[in-house]
């Protein structure tokens, strides 16, 4: 294969082969922009090098002929004694990995060519400075010498002087010192042969792909480990030749806000690396207008050309050598979520892109970030620690250490932050009451994180430096600072920072817009425009997971087209727990009926509220799902209570204890729950269906869909269905009856199950844990971190649908279900319904809708639109 491409041979679409930097240098070259000539060695050569520990056959010659062509063009030879060509050797992978890999400048200098360079430039100081930079960068990057050796030597030489005060003779002496460091630390001479310098640098750049920091960065950014990096060899231009030279970076628009204008920094008399290294203070790019007006105007022209050509915000690196402008790099620039929306909309106005493309340019993740409030100031001096940024937003409140206290204080109108070691389902009420949640254990997929994200609540989790003591109601932070219950803290779910005291918060205009308030500003106008377009192109409907009329109403404001999951068990918590206990304790059919009769009117009211909030839209109600013991007291607590009371224990407590023991299960998630419970406890499902029917009769335009959980065999569904159909007929109410697909067996027998179901809704939380055979509640804190590190999966399958395994079961169920019943309605109601990647998958396999928590609805709408484009 061809391993080396001249800049005139490439283009911007060859990033796989040439890396981002190489592809864009080629693109600029072909646009006729002033790019120093050069060539790119492909990432394929790098992959060969990494696999075999050496360069591919023939690469040396191929580089040789491209170098010869470069030399011919420049009229100078690499490292030639009286007028040397110098080059830079620059890394550049497909995805930008800022600062992760290496670049060596000024290759071609040695004891002879440094004199030639000095003579040609008429500047000795510059030549010796370039030479010492080469030895320093080469020593660090190629020979693996600790950079501090060079920096210490430079500092010692400088003393109190500025680096610009160093004379040629100082720098000449420094070169000798640096060569000594190389000899001492690397056990070899600094190579004086220019071609050897270049070849060693190329190999070092290849090898830097696997440097530990690069490996870590790729893992975090989910960049595949096997891509490798390309290497660019570029003729050097010099920004350090005097005050008529310099170097800078610029954006074609403000990457923070999207506003158009001149954004950048410039540094006179410097080489590119100095800007980033912050050695001297840069000046705002506008000042170049007075320093060098001709170059400034040319630069603005080029920026306009690049924007028109890439039809997007670009960032650039440039250098001016004695009044001549050179472009050294460009790429489509990174930007904040706010800028992403504003720029996409501006580009539509400018006629550079259409609305379809504008919607493709923004993401659900960006939208989600815009919906959270933020801290408006900084408070670094009050930072206690930084945990994991589990669910964005800014929350301020009094620290509380139990759900009961959270509910109590919030009930009095106070803002609280719930602080726990970790949370469990019992903390739900406290999490709802709190402004934010802080835990010292657990990762981004821990209970606290998942639930908080679903609720749109700020959460910092896994703040391991905090020692949380729920009994003493306090935590201790590094430095021995103790926070007691009632002390105010602030948590930033976007960064994971935890602060002592109150940090000021600004509300999110985007969230206010979705709430239906009228909000001004460019950002909200852009969001409105792109959302409207996404809605007009999407095929997937978006529903909400909502259990209360308040949630349902909010979901509707956010654009929900129905409820995809109402979890009825949430209606049995709190004060109603006692009624459920009565049901469990019932020992005769009569007692059981009494208990059910007490629950039925309460359930009827629940559903009435939902139908009213969702008038005219479908409401999917799932019959009771979790194991019964979740409604009973904790076994240990109760046993202790009974033991302490001894003979004084109430009869009810004794019976309860017996029931708790009887219902105890080793694997409750695989035990008596869902449809199994409905079949085992006669009358329970019937009561719920009667309540749905009664509520439907009261409602103006009810669209009830009754959903049976945890079905694995069509027979289970048929039995429940028969009874439900009878109850509905008696009440004269019509409703769809369908099932969740969350047991692998249901997916595999979907054709038969569709015979008894009018709709399927994929419960991908259970389907994922049953397909993989691991329990969500346990694995995330035990081995998931390890699995992510090992690359068993790139992202938790509870966060994003595992297309290969779980997704395959879904495809089977869709295909066989539709074959058996062409008008089968298909949806998803697991946590994945609000995950961007999973929304795309649901679109691809032809579902009718996704259902997610109210706060994720705008995200799902946007991603459903993007999936359809
Ligand atoms: P990174 O990817 O870390 O930005 P680069 O390859 O862009 O690394 O190079 C680092 C710095 O060196 C940049 O500021 C760039 O402008 C400068 N540089 C690279 N090649 C040349 C060259 N041929 N002439 C002048 N400066 C260069
Ligand atoms: Mg760069
Ligand atoms: Mg389930």
Image: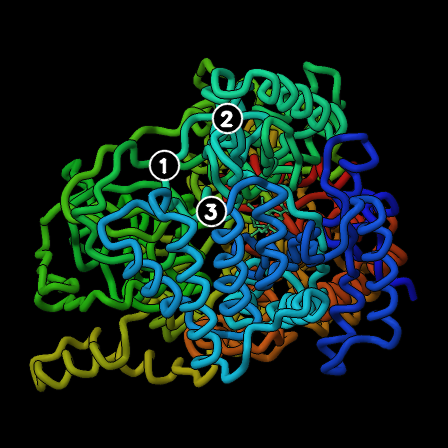
Residue drawn at (42%, 74%) of the image: 181
* Image-quadrant location for residue 465: bottom left
Judge left or right: residue 789 versus residue 420.
Answer: right
Q: Position of residue 733 (x, y in %)?
A: 64, 39
**Which image quarter holds the N terminus?**
bottom right
Residue labelled with disc 1: 281
Residue labelled with disc 2: 263
Camera sees residue 478: yes
Question: Helix, strand or loop at disc 2?
Answer: strand
Residue drawn at (73%, 32%) of the image: 34
Does the Cβ of the disc 1 residue fall within 8 Å of ligand 1? no
Mark 3 or 1: the one toward you: 3
Badge 2: few (under 14), some or many (20 or more) residues near its Cα, within 10 Å? some
Mark 1 or 2: the one toward you: 1
Judge left or right: residue 410 versus residue 513.
Answer: left
Residue drawn at (41%, 57%) of the image: 449
* Image-quadrant location for residue 699: top right
Badge 3: few (under 14), some or many (20 or more) residues near its Cα, within 10 Å? many
Camera sees residue 763: no
Residue labelled with disc 3: 125
Upstream in sequence: badge 3 or badge 1: 3
* Image-quadrant location for residue 373: top left
Decide which of 141, 576 is in the foreground and name it: 141
**Which image quarter holds the C terminus?**
top right
Does the Cβ of the disc 3 residue fall within 8 Å of ligand 1? no
Mark 2 or 3: the one toward you: 3
Query: Can you say whether 504 is above or below 523 in the image?
Result: below
Structural distance between the alpha carbons of marks 1 and 2 = 16 Å
């Amino acid at each position: 294969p061809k391993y080396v491409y001249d800049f005139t041979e490439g283009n911007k679409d060859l990033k796989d082969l040439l890396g981002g930097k190489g592809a864009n240098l080629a693109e600029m070259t072909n646009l006729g922009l002033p790019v120093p000539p050069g060539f790119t060695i492909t990432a394929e050569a790098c992959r060969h090098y990494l696999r075999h520990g050496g360069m591919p056959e023939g690469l040396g010659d191929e580089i040789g002929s491209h170098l010869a062509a470069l030399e011919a063009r420049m009229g100078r030879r690499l490292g030639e004694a009286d007028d040397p060509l110098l080059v830079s050797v620059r890394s550049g992978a497909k995805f930008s990995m800022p600062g992760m890999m290496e670049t060596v400048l000024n290759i071609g200098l040695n004891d002879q060519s440094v004199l030639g360079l000095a003579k040609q430039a008429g500047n000795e100081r510059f030549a010796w400075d370039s030479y010492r930079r080469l030895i320093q960068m080469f020593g660090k990057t190629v020979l693996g010498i600790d950079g501090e050796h060079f920096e210490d030597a430079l500092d010692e030489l400088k003393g109190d002087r500025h680096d610009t005060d160093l004379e040629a003779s100082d720098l000449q002496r420094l070169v000798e010192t640096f060569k000594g460091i190389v000899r001492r630390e690397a056990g070899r001479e600094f190579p004086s042969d220019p071609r050897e310098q270049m070849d060693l640098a190329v190999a070092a750049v290849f090898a830097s792909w696997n440097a530990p920091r690069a490996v870590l960065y790729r893992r975090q950014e989910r960049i595949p480990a096997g891509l490798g990096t390309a290497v660019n060899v570029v003729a050097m231009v010099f920004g350090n030749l005097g005050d008529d030279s310099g170097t800078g970076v610029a954006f074609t628009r403000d990457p923070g806000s999207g506003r158009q204008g001149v954004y950048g920094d410039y540094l006179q008399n410097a080489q590119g690396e100095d800007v980033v290294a912050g050695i001297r203070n840069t000046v705002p790019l506008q000042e170049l207008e007075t320093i060098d007006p001709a170059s400034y105007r040319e630069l603005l022209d080029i920026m306009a050309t690049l924007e028109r050509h890439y039809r997007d915000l670009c960032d650039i690196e440039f250098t001016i050598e004695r009044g001549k402008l050179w472009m050294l790099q460009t790429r489509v620039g990174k930007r904040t979520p706010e800028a992403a929306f504003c720029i996409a909309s501006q580009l539509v106005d400018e006629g550079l892109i259409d609305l379809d493309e504008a919607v493709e340019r923004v993401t659900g993740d960006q939208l989600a970030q815009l919906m959270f409030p933020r801290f408006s100031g900084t408070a670094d001096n009050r930072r206690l620690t930084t945990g994991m940024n589990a669910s964005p937003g800014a929350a301020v409140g009094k620290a509380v250490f139990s759900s009961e206290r959270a509910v109590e204080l919030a009930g009095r109108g106070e803002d609280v932050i719930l602080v726990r070691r970790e949370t469990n389902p019992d903390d739900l009420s406290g999490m709802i009451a709190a402004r934010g949640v802080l835990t010292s254990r657990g990762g981004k997929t821990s209970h606290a994180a998942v639930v908080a994200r679903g609720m749109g609540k700020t959460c910092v989790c896994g703040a391991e430096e905090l020692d949380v003591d729920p009994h003493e109601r306090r935590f201790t932070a590094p430095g021995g600072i103790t926070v007691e219950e009632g002390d105010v803290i602030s948590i930033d779910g976007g960064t994971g920072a935890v602060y002592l005291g109150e940090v000021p918060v600004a509300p999110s205009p985007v969230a206010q817009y979705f709430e239906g308030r009228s909000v001004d500003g460019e950002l909200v106008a852009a969001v409105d425009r792109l959302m409207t377009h996404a809605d007009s192109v999407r095929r997937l409907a978006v529903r909400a997971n909502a259990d209360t009329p308040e949630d349902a109403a909010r979901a509707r404001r956010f654009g929900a087209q129905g409820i995809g999951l109402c979890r009825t068990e949430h209606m049995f918590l709190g004060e109603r727990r006692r009624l459920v206990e009565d049901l469990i304790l019932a020992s005769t059919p009569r007692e059981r009926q009494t208990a059910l009769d007490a629950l039925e009117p309460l359930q009827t009211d629940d559903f009435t509220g939902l139908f009213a909030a969702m008038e005219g839209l479908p409401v999917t109600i799932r019959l009771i799902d979790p194991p019964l013991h979740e409604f009973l007291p904790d076994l240990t607590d109760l046993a202790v209570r009974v033991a302490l009371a001894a003979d004084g224990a109430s009869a009810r407590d004794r019976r309860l204890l017996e029931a708790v023991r009887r219902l105890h299960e080793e694997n409750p998630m695989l035990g008596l729950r869902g449809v199994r419970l409905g079949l085992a406890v006669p009358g329970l499902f019937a009561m719920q269906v009667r309540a749905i029917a009664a509520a439907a009769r009261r409602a103006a335009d009810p669209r009830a869909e009754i959903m049976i959980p945890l079905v694995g065999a069509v027979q289970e569904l048929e039995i429940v269905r028969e009874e439900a159909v009878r109850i509905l007929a008696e009440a004269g109410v019509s409703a769809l009856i369908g099932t969740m697909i969350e047991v692998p067996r249901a997916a595999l027998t979907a054709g038969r199950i569709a015979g008894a179901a009018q709709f399927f809704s994929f419960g991908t939380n259970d389907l994922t844990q049953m397909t993989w055979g691991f329990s969500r509640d346990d694995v995330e804190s035990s081995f998931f971190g390890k699995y992510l590190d090992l690359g068993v999966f790139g992202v938790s399958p509870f966060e994003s649908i595992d297309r290969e395994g779980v997704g395959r079961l879904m495809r089977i169920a869709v295909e066989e279900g539709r074959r058996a019943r062409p008008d089968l309605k298909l949806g998803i109601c697991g946590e994945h319904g609000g995950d961007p990647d999973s929304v795309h998958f649901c679109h691809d396999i032809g579902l009718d809708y996704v259902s997610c928590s109210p706060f994720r609805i705008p995200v799902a709408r946007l991603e459903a639109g993007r999936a359809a484009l």
